[in-house]
Amino acid sequence: FLSNGTKVLCQSSPPQAGFFPANEGVMLLPGSFKNKVAFITGGGTGLGKGMTTVLSTLGAECVIASRKLDVLQKTAEEISNQTGNKVHAVQCDVRDPASVTACVDELINVAGLPDVVINNAAGNFISPSENLSANAWRTITDIVLNGTAFVTLEVGKRLIKAEKGAAFLAITTIYAESGSGFVVPSAAAKAGVEALCKSLAAEWGRYGMRFNIIQPGPIKTKGAFSRLDPTGMFEKSMIGRIPTGRLGTPGEIANLAAYLCSDYATWVSGAIIRMDGGEYVSMAGEFNDLKKVTKEQWAMLETMIRKTKGS
Amino acid sequence: FLSNGTKVLCQSSPPQAGFFPANEGVMLLPGSFKNKVAFITGGGTGLGKGMTTVLSTLGAECVIASRKLDVLQKTAEEISNQTGNKVHAVQCDVRDPASVTACVDELINVAGLPDVVINNAAGNFISPSENLSANAWRTITDIVLNGTAFVTLEVGKRLIKAEKGAAFLAITTIYAESGSGFVVPSAAAKAGVEALCKSLAAEWGRYGMRFNIIQPGPIKTKGAFSRLDPTGMFEKSMIGRIPTGRLGTPGEIANLAAYLCSDYATWVSGAIIRMDGGEYVSMAGEFNDLKKVTKEQWAMLETMIRKTKGS
Amino acid sequence: FLSNGTKVLCQSSPPQAGFFPANEGVMLLPGSFKNKVAFITGGGTGLGKGMTTVLSTLGAECVIASRKLDVLQKTAEEISNQTGNKVHAVQCDVRDPASVTACVDELINVAGLPDVVINNAAGNFISPSENLSANAWRTITDIVLNGTAFVTLEVGKRLIKAEKGAAFLAITTIYAESGSGFVVPSAAAKAGVEALCKSLAAEWGRYGMRFNIIQPGPIKTKGAFSRLDPTGMFEKSMIGRIPTGRLGTPGEIANLAAYLCSDYATWVSGAIIRMDGGEYVSMAGEFNDLKKVTKEQWAMLETMIRKTKGS
Amino acid sequence: FLSNGTKVLCQSSPPQAGFFPANEGVMLLPGSFKNKVAFITGGGTGLGKGMTTVLSTLGAECVIASRKLDVLQKTAEEISNQTGNKVHAVQCDVRDPASVTACVDELINVAGLPDVVINNAAGNFISPSENLSANAWRTITDIVLNGTAFVTLEVGKRLIKAEKGAAFLAITTIYAESGSGFVVPSAAAKAGVEALCKSLAAEWGRYGMRFNIIQPGPIKTKGAFSRLDPTGMFEKSMIGRIPTGRLGTPGEIANLAAYLCSDYATWVSGAIIRMDGGEYVSMAGEFNDLKKVTKEQWAMLETMIRKTKGS
Ligand SMILES: NC(=O)c1ccc[n+]([C@@H]2O[C@H](COP(=O)([O-])OP(=O)(O)OC[C@H]3O[C@@H](n4cnc5c(N)ncnc54)[C@H](OP(=O)(O)O)[C@@H]3O)[C@@H](O)[C@H]2O)c1
Ligand SMILES: NC(=O)c1ccc[n+]([C@@H]2O[C@H](COP(=O)([O-])OP(=O)(O)OC[C@H]3O[C@@H](n4cnc5c(N)ncnc54)[C@H](OP(=O)(O)O)[C@@H]3O)[C@@H](O)[C@H]2O)c1
Ligand SMILES: NC(=O)c1ccc[n+]([C@@H]2O[C@H](COP(=O)([O-])OP(=O)(O)OC[C@H]3O[C@@H](n4cnc5c(N)ncnc54)[C@H](OP(=O)(O)O)[C@@H]3O)[C@@H](O)[C@H]2O)c1
Ligand SMILES: NC(=O)c1ccc[n+]([C@@H]2O[C@H](COP(=O)([O-])OP(=O)(O)OC[C@H]3O[C@@H](n4cnc5c(N)ncnc54)[C@H](OP(=O)(O)O)[C@@H]3O)[C@@H](O)[C@H]2O)c1
């Protein structure tokens, strides 16, 4: 699937993409996460799988959690085989506080209190808002916002009791800031996650915890694209407005995530890092459409403007 | 209660408060909302009551909704007596989609489709986050975020079907932007509300709807202060950091709200207006504490700085 | 010119524009600015002229200042004839501190210390950034950022000495927040103006001053459009992405400005109010392009999404 | 000086600082910047020296530029001796376009077109705004905003002509976002720099350039602290409000800077990364002062809140 996608991408990429090749090699020094425990929700697929792979490669003992145990187990085995470090799979529906409690019990049981907690599980789909039922709305906010809160509160309380610090990371999205039509429950819930993280960065620093956020732009995972661009018809226009001329990759997110959770970033807290190839600023800036103007047209426009007198 | 509060406030106010007297007279021209229907959640108390009073004074037929029917009815009668315009009280728990549907049915029944919808109902209380249960978390996000969504979706769908436009307004808070410890569920939910409104401002403009937000700073309502400053011990320090030297009043919010929902603001959509006496910028700016430096100390500091050579 | 423009606009407006008619009647109660002095830079043309007209109508004695004395005098006479209140024209190049000092001297001489100060003068033009000389860059930052600072510092110092308060307003733009290609000096300078105002809202509240900002979206003034869309070829696409389906008008800005500078807004300081018909959120939200999807296409997309299994 | 400062810092640090030790070892893999040329303004001292050291360690050929050639030469020699890679010193006053042109000529002459450009030069000092002359204002905006623009435009034009890409980084500050009293020219100019970078991230992506920003919190360099806290009297209160309980270090900024300019971050553009130990969110959040409330007081407050009935 992905390789196919990559091929399409390369054909339609604007020329500047060549300046911005994706380096997906592991960035940090080997052993950076030795003796560390990392807990990643939604770690069985997509970006979560990518982050787990990098943390495991760097020496962390990882625990991944989501609803589909079989998917988790397959991923855990695959990564563990590759890195030689333990990866545990724990079933968990983050919407359900009891399930979260049981999962954190097991996490501590198998690996101990975590040093790294990544709130990456999410749900999303495109829809005109007038087609949303109250249930559809609640499904998304339950997973994304309440799920993140339940995991964070459950793990946080245990850390506080044990007087242990940790680095928390949440994966949100570039439209958490601006909002966006057609993905409104996700926009609202992700904005909530950001406020949660900024709030606890301030409140729980005294307990040794830090909280940061990555806002990814479009990255071709099966989970995201099958629900956000099922026909593939928006991919080209997305790439067209990304200044770096391409989609992102799970490996790039994973390297940034590893940095933020590492000892090199102990002074980063309450920060939001956008990684989107420049898509957000490109969309938001009112005159960026002028990139369509040709050199010849500019010459004409400049003459007209120079002739303008007065207001 | 309020008069008492006002007295305390006046005694501890810094001198500049005299430059910033609160004008609570109704700002817009009489009749500005004639033949308009306004729906205000949480309209029985505090800021909601203030906004209902102003809209009713300006000619709107108002429908107020919340859980306590007796409180609503008392307020409705009081305002109606004062303004001579109809005010209807409808029971509604915004957390419950069925209750919201029934309420909107009644709203349309008694007054017709609304021209103005104000999402003002909310819940909040201060607490260290490690003391929050999953239930406590959910109670706040259910009222504030899901409640706002249910009301907005329910009313919006009916408006779309009827091809009628409307002005929506949500009341959030200044810490929706920054987050804040000790009120984390509220911070997260209010941030979610802002994203919801910005999203629909973009998506539902085509149906004739606009969406805006007021972020109030501290205003001494019973509902807010009894849960956020029960002992009154933080009021003084709050006033001390507000550049305009005083708390806000419900009448000031109401005038701004009326403007935003009026025909003068048809080109305002997706906007967030902070009304907080400058508290937010005053807290957030790193060097604002230097206001404590005296004139004499400044003279000394300036001499020291002038003597500095090189980096 | 404008009437021509208006005709074009009406023809190409999307249907929802009918829901959002511009009410340009004066909003505040007559006499709201009686015995007040207002100082407006760039008050001879465009938005500045619109704000001066409304403040003068409401009773203010106005002083308008910019480089072209003849333009100012014509406007002053026109407005004064219309409102019956004094309007003074003072020549001033805001880039030049000496000119600003002389202008403020004259302002105080003819009308007294101001109650309202509107930093509205600006310069701007579209250009690929690689075509900008250092001089072109400096011309814009000198007018927009330094000019605003010189006026604000000069007036502020006099107010502080006289122990008099005032309401300051600056006119920036929606791309101050996001930045924008092709108008980069303006984006940088306007962002600087916003930081200046937020900073002084915090610092100078103790002297009785408040500072607020309006970020207008596109409004068809001769000054702006002749330098930003000289051929008129971008107007249609701009209107197409504005949720309210039309450009703004000077009267709408003027009513908002009058409110912000009035006694009803003494508790508004350090605020940024976007008035853009929703353009900003519409551009910035990643999935807003989906408004192009038809009902039939949505039905198909929803079927595809429902069939998606797993991540 | 610094060691002294560090000692004071350790004594007054809150207990949680132990959870957040600064890792100043070089983070990226050796050779990450081999065959790359990096140009750093203000590279002779403070944070600029730190970034140059790390980039040089990682293999880059560095060119540092500022006004004091002797300081630059001493730093260049020191770093080069340490890393074994070339470091060139070029005199430049970034306020002067001719000086910038000459400097870029020399940069290209000695090392070739740069792969990395860091706009780090700045000026700043604390002062009540009413004490600022027009000249003082202009000095800061000339260095910080215009200086950054002149360097960026000059280098950018050459890169475009040569069809070569590059990674740009600017060092701003946390109060660029909120503004701040008492450092107003710096706040305005730094906000301008951020808008410049976001704008060009959108516009110049097509030429292979990306633009990012680091907003540092307080880091004890001689240049910054001698002009921002000459007596040292604000350091303690600063540390007191930083959730991670300590100031930052040049090495931490340098590692983040190296990442952002590296091949691992080719998909990061138009991003703003706050590195401040959580200070910003801690200051900005309205209820964060409640961290002063003791456990016993919380018990009492919770009882009072639970007893609250109605609004
Ligand atoms: N890909 C993008 O373009 C993009 C862009 C912006 C943001 N993001 C964010 O990146 C994160 C990862 O997304 P992705 O693209 O990797 O998609 P994905 O593969 O679909 O990842 C979502 C993960 O969440 C888990 N999950 C869903 N509901 C859950 C629940 N109730 N309890 C526990 N786990 C649950 C899923 O596992 P189960 O099905 O087994 O539960 C799945 O592993 C998400 O937060 C997403 O919002 C992605
Ligand atoms: N006062 C401030 O300083 C301040 C500052 C920032 C923001 N705000 C915001 O301003 C708004 C009004 O607050 P306020 O100060 O006026 O306090 P308030 O009087 O307590 O208002 C809250 C209202 O919400 C209603 N409500 C609560 N839960 C509800 C539910 N489940 N369903 C329906 N209605 C419900 C309450 O009525 P019932 O109990 O009858 O349901 C009440 O009328 C809130 O959104 C608040 O967050 C206030
Ligand atoms: N129209 C829009 O779509 C739009 C959108 C966003 C923001 N804005 C902002 O709105 C404000 C007004 O713009 P507008 O559309 O009304 O355009 P405008 O008519 O061109 O107004 C600009 C005014 O600034 C004055 N000015 C320029 N340079 C000056 C200097 N060195 N010293 C003193 N005055 C100077 C001009 O007068 P002289 O030539 O006589 O000096 C003119 O009156 C500006 O701040 C603009 O950035 C406009
Ligand atoms: N340290 C902090 O706490 C902190 C916090 C936030 C942001 N920052 C930012 O970090 C950056 C570095 O600051 P720092 O703390 O390292 O202080 P610093 O050592 O004083 O660095 C400033 C540098 O700028 C150079 N410079 C000043 N004016 C110049 C001009 N006209 N032309 C060329 N170069 C010029 C100076 O060199 P010459 O004197 O030789 O010209 C000096 O090397 C600055 O952008 C600062 O705003 C620092």
Image (cartoon, coloured by chain):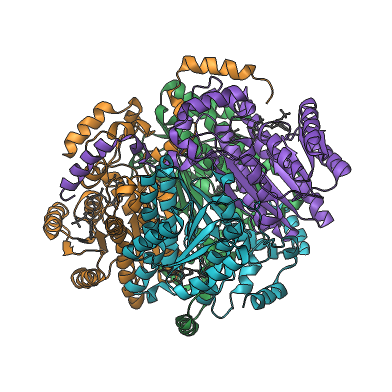
Chain colours: A orange, B cyan, C purple, D green
Q: Residue at x 69, y 54 (%)?
A: C210
Q: Is residue C152 above or below residue D283?
A: above
Q: Nearer the viewer, residue B192 or A156?
A: B192
Residue C163 seen in the figure = yes
Which quarter shows the N terminus of chain A? top left
Image location (x, y in percent) of residue B161:
35, 46
Judged from the image, the quadrant occupied by ligand 3 is: top right
Give the vertical position of A62 relative to A247 (above or below).
below
- Whether residue D70 is visible: no
Percent x, y of residue D74 = 56, 43
Left or right relative to D6: residue B247: right
Q: Residue at x 76, y 55 (%)?
A: C165
- Quarter of the figure with residue C25: top right
- Judge by depth and name the residue closer to the eye, D105 or B139: B139
- Lateral position of residue C101 relative to residue A74, left or right: right
Question: Looking at the rendering, in which quadrant would you find the C terminus of chain A?
Answer: top right
